[in-house]
Amino acid sequence: LPYLMNLNTSRDIQLKAATEERSRLSREMHDGVNQLLNLVKLKVEALQQTVANGNSEQALNDTNEIKDLVKEAIHEARDLVSELRVSKQGFVATIAQYTTDFTRTYGIKCILHVADGEVHIPMSAELELLHIVREALANVYRHSAAEKIEVTLESNRGVIEMVIRDNGHGFVLGAIHNGHGL
């Protein structure tokens, strides 16, 4: 009986984790890809009016902006798809693949340093650390104008340390900010 109870508890934990992950991905799709595609729709509607008015120079500018938005939506969708299939090769291989893809996609050199080539991370923490890396790299791309990023992972006696550094312009910690986040 205790063994069956442990199996049921384990299944409940896995189901809860899967449900939370689906909810998080749903929010990210809504906040990312969905908003970008709605913006593209609005821009296309404005472009139609611009073309109808015969303003070809503005129409060309609008099509370039739409192209950039579609490109960004494609990248967001790729990131979400890659999150759905965390590498079966393991956590470090997944982070390594993501940093390589990031460099290829955005042209910002991203270097991964892993202590002794291995990091021992509990499975429950892997997904969270992967999300942190992805969000940090996305913020570097969006805001820092960096040319280089270094991601360092170490684990020592059950303590996991991840450091993400870039050579971007940064921000003033005490500055008043009317947005969200830092």
Image: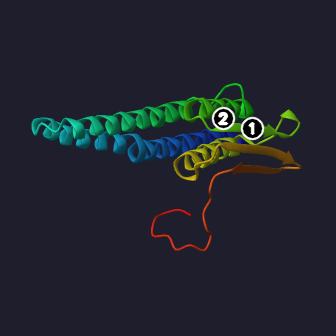
Q: Tag 1 or tag 2, which sits nearer the N-term? A: 2
Q: Which residue is mark 2?
A: 99
Q: Position of residue 33 (x, y in %)?
A: 39, 40
Q: Quadrant of residue 73?
A: top left
Question: Where residue 44 sits in the image (x, y, percent)?
Answer: 23, 37
Q: How many marks?
A: 2
Q: Secondary structure at mark 2?
A: helix
At label 1, counting other C-alpha atoms closer than 10 Å, the crowd grade (few under 14, some 14-19, many 20 or more) is some
Rendered view: 82 above or below 15: above
Q: Is residue 108 left or right of residue 177?
A: right
Inter-mark Cα distance, 2 to 1: 7 Å
Q: Which residue is mark 1?
A: 112
Task: Give the residue displayed 68% in from the left and 43% down from the top.
Answer: 148
* Circle 1: residue type: Leu
Q: Are marks 2 and 1 in contact (CB under 8 Å)?
A: yes
* Quarter of the C terminus within the rendering: bottom right
Q: Nearer the viewer, residue 172 or 17?
A: 172
Residue 163 vertical placement versus 47 (above, below)? below
By what rule are the colours in the image chosen?
Answer: rainbow
Residue 36 % position (x, y):
36, 42
Mark 2 burial class by Cα count in 10 Å: few <14, some 14-19, many 20+? many
Quarter the N terminus occupies: top right
